[in-house]
Amino acid sequence: MSVLVVGLSHRSAPVAVLERTAVTGDGLAKLLNEVHDHAHVGEAAIVSTCNRVEVYAVVDKFHGGVSGISELLSLHSGIPLDDLSRYLYVHYEDRAIQHAFSVACGLDSMVVGEGQILGQIRQAFRLAQEHGTLGRELHDVLQQALRVGKRAHHETGIDKAGASLVSVGLDVAAAHLGPLDGVRALVMGAGSMSGLAVATLSRAGAREIVVANRTFERAERLAGSVPTPARAVELAEADAELAAADLVVSCIGANGLMISADRLVAQGVGSDGRRRFFLDLALPHDVDPAVRRLPGVALAGLDDLRTAQEAAEAIGPEAIEAVRRIVCDEVAVFLGAARAAAVAPTVVALRSKAADVVEAELARLTGRLPDLDDRARKEITHTVRRVVDKLLHAPTVRVKELALAPGGDTYADALRELFDLDPKAPEAVAVADMRSAATSVGEVLPGGPGGSSPQRGADLSSPPGGADGGPGESRGAEL
C-alpha cells in the first residue's frame, strides 16, 4: 500500500473550477466515505479549503487509485472527467509525503507562509478520524506534516513573513478606501476566516464592526471577542448594515450569491456618493461580480487577491529556502523511519523462527541426553543461543540499514526467501504492531513509504517507477 495525493489548487486551476469543486459539510463527509469505500483505497483524508481540494489516500494500485479518486471528484463537482483531469495533479509515494509537508509549511499556499493551513490539516485529520477512514499510514503522514509545519514556522518565521489572505485583502481595500481606521465594517459569517477578519479590522482601528451570521450566538461571540465596538445581527437582517458599511467582508460560501447588485441598489448603494469596498473571501463566491458596476463600489475576490499577492510578494527568499531544506530533511527522516519500520516485522519473524529452531533442538537434546546435569544443560543452552544471535546480528542490522534507502524493502523480501519464512509471519507482526498503535489515533492530535511522483501535466497512464500492480462557511483555514 502506498500514499497517493490527487487534487487541484489555485496553482493548477482557475477560481471558477475551484468554485465548482469546493466541497464542505455533508458533501465533504460523503466524498470522504466514497473515496474510502473504493476498491483500491485503504485509508483516506481530504484537505478542503477555498484554494484547494486534495484527497490523501493509501492505495494498493496507482492506476486504480488515481482513476477512482478522479472519477469521484468529477461526480461531486459536476465537471466531466476529461475536463477536470486538466487541472488535477498527482503525487505518489515519496512525492506525496513531500507535498504534504510542503502544504503544511505554507509553501504551496496562495499567500506563501500563511499558517492557517495547519488548522485545515487538523480538520481533515479529525474528520477522517470521526468517519473511521484514517489508518496508521495516513495518521503518521498527517501528524508529521503538522509537526513539520510548526517547526518551519518556529525556525524560519515564514508564517510571519507571509500575511494571511485576509491581510492581503484588507490591504487592497485600504488602497480603495484609504486607511481603515475609522471605517464601518460588516463581516458576514462567523467562521475562522471571519474571526481573523474581525481581529485584523479591530487592530486596524475600525470605528465599528458588525458581524452577521445565520447562528446569532456565534456572531455574538465573535463580536464580543474584540475591544472595538462590535455587535451581532442575524444574517437575514443584514440589508441595513450593507447600506451603512464602508467595508464588507464576506466569508460564507453558500450555494448561491449572498449579495447581489439589485439587493445593494435597493439599499441605496451606488446612489449616495459614498465609496465602498467588498472583499469576497468565499468559495463559492458570495458577492455578485456585477456590484463592480455600481458607482463608488469596488470588489476583490480570490482571483484579484492572487494577482495582488503575486505583485506584492514580500516573503524573503532566504526564509523560503530554509523551509524547503527543512521539508527535504524531514521527508528523508520520515521515509527512512517508514522503510525501517516496514522491514522490522521480517526481522522479528526471522528471530522468532530462529528461537523456535533453538528450542526444538534443545528439547531434542534433552530427549537424547536425559541424564545431562543442569550446569552442563544451562551452558549448552546459553552457547547455542549466543551462536544463533551472533549469526543473525550482522544480517539483521545490515537489512535495517539498507532499508533506509529507496527500494530497501527488497532486502526484507530476500530474507524471507533465504530463510524460508512463512509469508504470514511478518504480516502477523505488522498487524499486531498496528493494533497496538491504533489507540494512539484517538489519543494523539495530529499534528509512508517511497518512490516518485507524476506531476501535473504528466502522463497518468503509466505509474512512476512501474508502480502499478506489482464550507457552509469558507472553511477559514488556508482559504
Image (cartoon, helix red, strand yellow):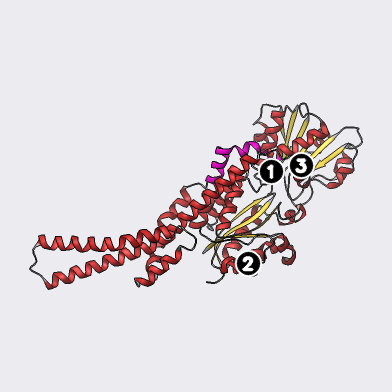
At label 1, which amino acid type do we have?
A: Val
Q: Quadrant of residue 456?
A: bottom right
38 vs 236, nearest the viewer = 38
Mark 1 residue element: loop
Give the CA distance from mark 2 to mark 1: 31 Å
**Which quadrant of the figure has residue 131?**
bottom right
Where is residue 108 shown, x and y percent of the image? Answer: 65, 49
In terms of sequence position, does the residue under pointer 2 or pointer 1 come before the other?
2
| Amino acid type of the residue that numbered disc 2 sits on in the rendered structure | Gly
Residue 2 coordinates in the image, percent (x, y): 53, 62
Residue 156 colored in magenta in the image: yes
Q: Amino acid at mark 3?
A: Ala
Mark 1, residue position: 111
Q: Nearer the viewer, mark 2 or mark 3?
A: 3
Q: Secondary structure at mark 2?
A: helix
Task: Determine whether label 1 and label 3 are within 8 Å by CB.
Answer: no
Residue hosting label 3 = 311
Could one spot residue 369 in this view of the protein?
Answer: yes
Q: Nearer the viewer, residue 369 or 65?
A: 369
Visible in this render: residue 115? no
387 is higher (above) or lower (below) than 437: below
Q: Give the magenta part as a residue range.
A: 146-165
Q: CA distance from mark 2 to mark 3?
A: 38 Å
Residue 68 image label:
2
249 or 376: nearer the viewer: 376
Figure check: 196 above or below 10: above
145 lies left or right of 162:
left
